């Protein structure tokens, strides 16, 4: 069964850091562009970052630009989201999502992705 599994969530103080991982299971993640999304209670799921299969193209939402960094290690079948200077408004469930195929650019819309993980909770305490 093909699936994505997120890990690395937790509770951190404001200003702290976390690194999320997205692992491919039953699939070769190298062949997927990966997007990171988050959903806070009572809010819509929003795209915050993405990375193409090669890692040559990345994109960030304005709310996280300069604080979050997406990267991938294709040898390990992993994609990472390094989150620095976390703020209470970053509290949400974070999801990774996969879009199969080599592309020049990646999108941050939910409709761009067909494969989703179950999410990992990130809580930032003030």
Image: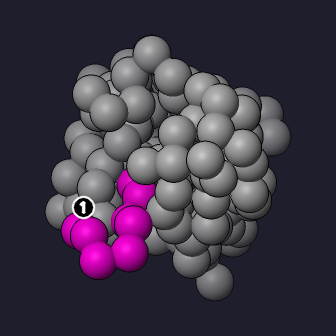
* Residue in view at x 58 percent, y 36 percent: 86
The quarter of the picture where the N terminus appears is bottom right
* Residue in view at x 38 percent, y 66 percent: 39
Residue 83 shows up from this direction: no
Q: Which of the 4 image quadrants contains residue 83? A: top right
Q: Is residue 99 above or below residue 13?
A: below
The secondary structure type at the circle numbered 1 is helix
Which residue is identified by label 1? 110
x and y, in percent, of residue 26 in the image: 69, 70
Magenta residues, as a range? Answer: 37-44
Q: Is residue 99 above or below residue 64?
A: below
The answer to if 42 sits in the magenta stretch is yes
Query: In this rendering, would 70 be left or right of 58?
Result: right
x and y, in percent, of residue 107 in the image: 24, 41
Residue 104 shows up from this direction: yes
Query: In this rendering, would 70 be left or right of 57?
Result: right
51 or 61, nearer to the observer: 61
Q: Which of the 4 image quadrants contains residue 10? A: bottom right
The secondary structure that dominates the magenta segment is: loop
The answer to if 63 sits in the magenta stretch is no
Q: Residue furthest bottom?
A: 1
């Amino acid at each position: 069964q093909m699936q994505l599994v997120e890990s690395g969530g937790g509770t951190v103080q404001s200003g702290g850091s976390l690194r999320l991982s997205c692992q491919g299971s039953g699939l070769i993640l190298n062949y997927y562009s990966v997007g990171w999304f988050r959903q806070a209670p009572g809010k819509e799921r929003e795209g915050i970052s993405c990375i193409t299969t090669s890692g040559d193209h990345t994109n960030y939402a304005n709310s996280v630009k300069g604080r979050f960094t997406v990267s991938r290690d294709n040898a390990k079948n992993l994609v990472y989201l390094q989150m620095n200077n976390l703020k209470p408004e970053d509290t949400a469930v974070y999801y990774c999502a996969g879009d199969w195929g080599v592309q020049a650019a990646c999108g941050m819309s939910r409709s761009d992705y067909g494969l989703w993980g179950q999410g990992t909770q990130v809580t930032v305490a003030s």
